[in-house]
Amino acid sequence: MSLAPLPLATKVTVLRGLGPARAAALQEAGLDTLRDLLWSLPYRYVDRGSLRSLGSLELRGFEGPEGGVVTVLGTLQDLRQSTTRVQHMALTEALLTDGTGTLRLLWFNQPYLGRTLKVGERLLAFGSLAMGRHGLEMRGPQFEVMGRGEETPWVRRFLPLYRKLGPLPGRVRQRLVAEALGRAHPPDEWLPLELSRDLPDTLTALRLLHDPPDESEGRALDLGTTPAHQRLAAEELFAFALGVALRRAGRLKRRGLVVPTSPDLRERLKAYLPFKLTGAQRRAFKEIVADLTSGRVMNRLLQGDVGSGKTLVAFLSMAMVAETGGQGALLVPTEVLARQHAASFQRLLGSEAGAMQLLLGGMKAAEKRAALARIASGEARYVVGTHALFQESVAFHQLQLIVVDEQHRFGVKQREALKEKGGDPHWLVMSATPIPRSLALAIFGDLDQSVLDELPPGRQPITTKLHRPEAAERAWEQMRRELAEGRQAFVVSPSIDPSDGGSISGSQGRPGDARSAAFDGGKVQLRDIQAMEALLRGIFPDEGIEVVHGRLKADEMAVRMGRFVAGKAKILLATTVIEVGVDVPNATVMVVDHAERFGLSQLHQLRGRVGRGAHRSHFHMISGSETERLQILVETQDGFRIAQKDLELRGPGEFFGVRQAGLPQFQVADLVRDRALLLRCREAADRALAVGLSETQTEWLRREQVRLRLAEIS
Ligand code: ADP
Ligand code: MG
């Protein structure tokens, strides 16, 4: 039967053997067209040469999560379910055999495996080996069910494996993909030559990845770095970059509010400054002034390492607007931070402090009504607040500038909501953690950037040490010395309840990383914040200790923080609620317990809570594992370097801590791996727009924009 070739935009439902249930599973996964199906690549390629016979297995070289992952193929002989005695976890045990030997497989907390696995079925299993009570075993392996047939699943050297989608097994997907590849019509080239040169065409790339020839490079296939991967990634990233460039072009056409400057205004702003600006602060502010006076809408990202003085730049920008009849709003992620910013704004404003208004969700009704009235009348020219600023009841008199502190904690939708409060206000976004350029582009779209690459003078480097739990006494000793000198101390405990907002997934591997599936039944017991409090009260019986965490009511939190800020309590024990912003110059030592539970950037951010005054400061991490990863904090205080490393280790989603951050969802492109390509695509997009898009490009872009939900990125 010969069939007419199908454009990639054809719905997957044309494929044979796709009943309603399976079609629905594809749809649910967002695989609507042949293009979607084909861009959804195998999650793993198994090299026939890497297969080990069960009789040949030995522990050496394959032990522990750092060891190599072994691939085995065998038949399930025995299957049983039980519960572990100590931790009461569901335990699924299976015996795999291949004629040369047997291997025990164990899974924890996956009781459904007892129903889905069947004795007599063949299983391809990947995992690292460990020595168990009954000999070699594989704990928590990833696996693929190969059915009951005798025939080998290998047609060629590489066997591509697809994730199961609902009722659609990987093997069926393999068949659908093969049919789609056979029937797809080669699409018109839409990438500019500067990107497509040296890369295979689209259909060839797809064939190379779904049915890799024997001479393919196994490692490059797994890492996603073959020219074929580059081809598909370039298509996604180019579409993305075009979308961003188009929005930018649209923004530059919008008329922005012109904030007038004058020598007189400059003098008035200067009068507010408690210190001389650093060169970097002066540069950044100049760039902001240029935006505010340009007649176009400002959309700028202010980046800087912890302690580089972003707040002062934000204040100056808001003062510029406030002094010329407008209102500026500073949006921050937590009430603690909002109060703190409000206090420092009041200090800076001096006799003008009455122009500042705080707005918090937790305010009492009367207090809130008064605040809203002052905001609506324009009496409040500086507004500092949390998410409460998004509420419909908030109306501004003349909102001209929105400054967002620690932007990545806010969702794109919330940003949009705030935008609707004023005509078309200027935006200044400040990021707490330095963000590599490619990622900034991906998450913030077309923002212009200012970078504070200089710390205020007089800062002393922070001594950083890493201790194993049994040597923690060294950290406490240091703390004792600092307290005796009249200084204050932070102690940070990881939050163990995922619902209280302290996301602490620093110790996990990247998604798809075989290591993340590794056995973790032997997890170290976590010392929680209560246990830490008891410990601290034992070590420092005479000191005032305040404890804060995400589950406290806002006013209780403010009271406790207040006692620490005022110096009435010398020790603040906290979860990561103090990660951002908290500014207590007299605090000179921080001890982080279970440092392995934190991301590198998060630790760097925490470290930034000390070293803010004239005294030398100390940062101690206590950790019994992952000492290699944590070492970079000992080595450097360059937040940009730490951020890059963190990003490489954890990927963009974890790096930002929240998925709602509005990262584009690519199928093939990887924002970390393909960052150089993204920057090239951005340049190519500018050039393509300058000469005008071809019809093919316009058509592609339209479809890709829907798929990548590009409209949500501003
Ligand atoms: P971050 O960039 O981390 O938000 P902050 O704005 O909190 O940093 O500033 C860190 C500290 O540096 C604050 O205590 C602030 O008062 C101080 N600071 C800011 N700018 C200067 C400056 N130009 N000279 C001296 N100290 C400064
Ligand atoms: Mg800050």
Image (cartoon, rainbow, N blue to C red):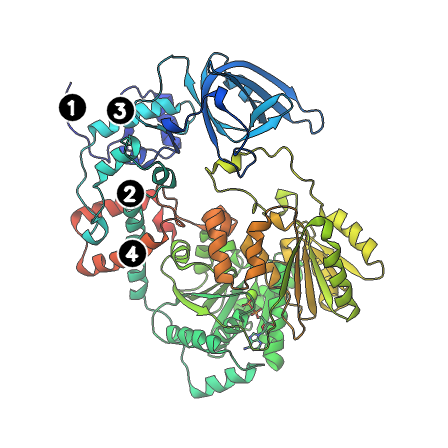
Type of the residue with mark 4: Arg
Q: Which mark is residue 15?
A: 3
Q: State the CA–CA distance, disc 4 to disc 3.
A: 36 Å
- Residue corresponding to mark 1: 3
Instruction: Tell which circle, 3 or 2, labels the residue nearer the N-terminal end.
Output: 3
- Verify CB contact (< 8 Å) between mark 3 and mark 1: no
Type of the residue with mark 2: Leu
**Closer to viewer: mark 4 or mark 3:** 4
- Verify CB contact (< 8 Å) between mark 3 and mark 2: no
231 or 127: nearer the eye? 127
> Which structural element holds mark 4?
helix
- Estimate the x, y position of residue 549 in percent, counting from the top left: 68, 52
- Estimate the x, y position of residue 704 in percent, counting from the top left: 29, 44
> Which structural element holds mark 2?
helix
Q: State the CA–CA distance, disc 1 to disc 2.
A: 26 Å
660 or 400: nearer the eye? 660
Q: Is residue 660 visible?
A: no
Q: Is residue 613 visible?
A: yes
Type of the residue with mark 1: Leu
- Estimate the x, y position of residue 4 in percent, counting from the top left: 15, 27
In the image, residue 357 sits, relative to residue 572, either above or below, namely: below
- Residue corresponding to mark 4: 680
- Residue corresponding to mark 2: 232
- Verify CB contact (< 8 Å) between mark 1 and mark 2: no
Type of the residue with mark 3: Leu
- Estimate the x, y position of residue 66 in percent, counting from the top left: 53, 39
